[in-house]
Image: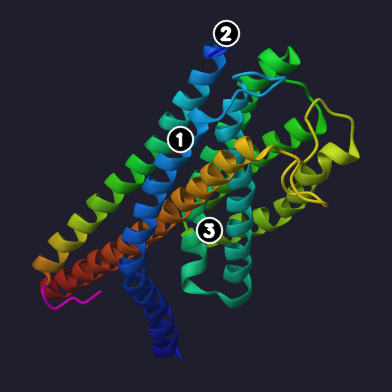
Amino acid sequence: MGGYAAYVWPAYGLAVVILGGLALASILSARAARRELQRLQQEQPRGRG
Amino acid sequence: MATTFNLHRFANPARFMRLTDVVLPWLSAAAVASLAIGLVMAFRAPPDYQQGETVRIMFIHVPAAMMGMMCYACMAVASAAALIWRHPLADVAAQAAAPLGAGFTLLCLVTGSLWGAPMWGTWWVWDARLTSVLILFFLYLGYIALANAFDDPERGARAAAILSLVGVINLPIIHFSVNWWNTLHQPASIVRMGGPTIDPSILHPLLIMALAFQFIFLALWILRTRTALVRAKIDTLRQRAAAASGVDRG
């Protein structure tokens, strides 16, 4: 990296951490919400929300 | 009156869920594909004749900066729609966008620092461009804090929407700061009168990365909006269950 590895790689690493973190958090929270909704709808079959 | 209002509240989010059921997988695939291509191109691009390998930081820094501002614009438009038309999706969408915008802006600030250290000889200066982007980051944090600061979520949403509209003034300030005031930051080289001034070997990877960031933002924005709608539905079902069990016991 022409002597600049200490600047270039942290920039890409941080992109992975921030964007990957946002993606992971969004996906996990979406999954948890969907499961919770399914559970509630099974408990209340007539409730269409 | 109450019935029509409730129907109105329910109809649009339902349509949004159906539409995004179809759109979201394609958007996610586009995000992954463009990011993969963009990263390959970013590391195949030749080093800059003056800045050497540090130019690769730009492929993260500039798309992050664009999305930080674009996301704020989306949030502000959604907030305006929430305040003016009381569109049921608007507040939900605005609040779903805020953490994404904060993430992109933080990424822009830190990668800018990592680029500034070797090229400018400093991690940070309090000039107009850097300071106005830092303010953008704080606007996101303030928006998130304000939206969650009230017991009544509707009051929080209203207050946060007003804050986001006031903060729109910061967007032109960020964009034109490099022309209006002295700064270490270079002037615009892509979105400018007379076309881009960057060599195609570096411009093309940059544009693909910008596209990838755009897809990432859209996919996550839609996903988070959907999650918020599902949670709202969960709350409604819980309240209904609580009311029903209250009736049974009574």
The label nearer to you, 3 versus 1, is: 1
Write down the chain letter for disc 1: B
**A44 relative to B228, above or below:** below
In the rendered structure, which disc, 3 or 1, sits on the residue that comes first in sequence? 1
Left or right: residue B127 versus residue B133 is: right
Q: Main secondary structure of the magenta part?
A: loop
Give SS at disc 3: helix
Q: Are marks 3 and 1 in contact (CB under 8 Å)?
A: no
Task: Give the residue at x 30% y 67%.
Answer: B21
The residue beneath circle 3 is B94
What residue span does the magenta drawing correspond to?
A45-49
The residue beneath circle 2 is A3
Kind of residue at badge 1: Leu
List x then y, in percent, for residue B23.
Answer: 36, 66
Say whether residue B123 is visible: no
**Disc 3 to disc 2, how far (Cα)?**
42 Å
Task: Give the residue at x 34% y 41%.
Answer: A25
Tell me, for residue B39, which label it has, or none: 1
Kind of residue at badge 3: Ala
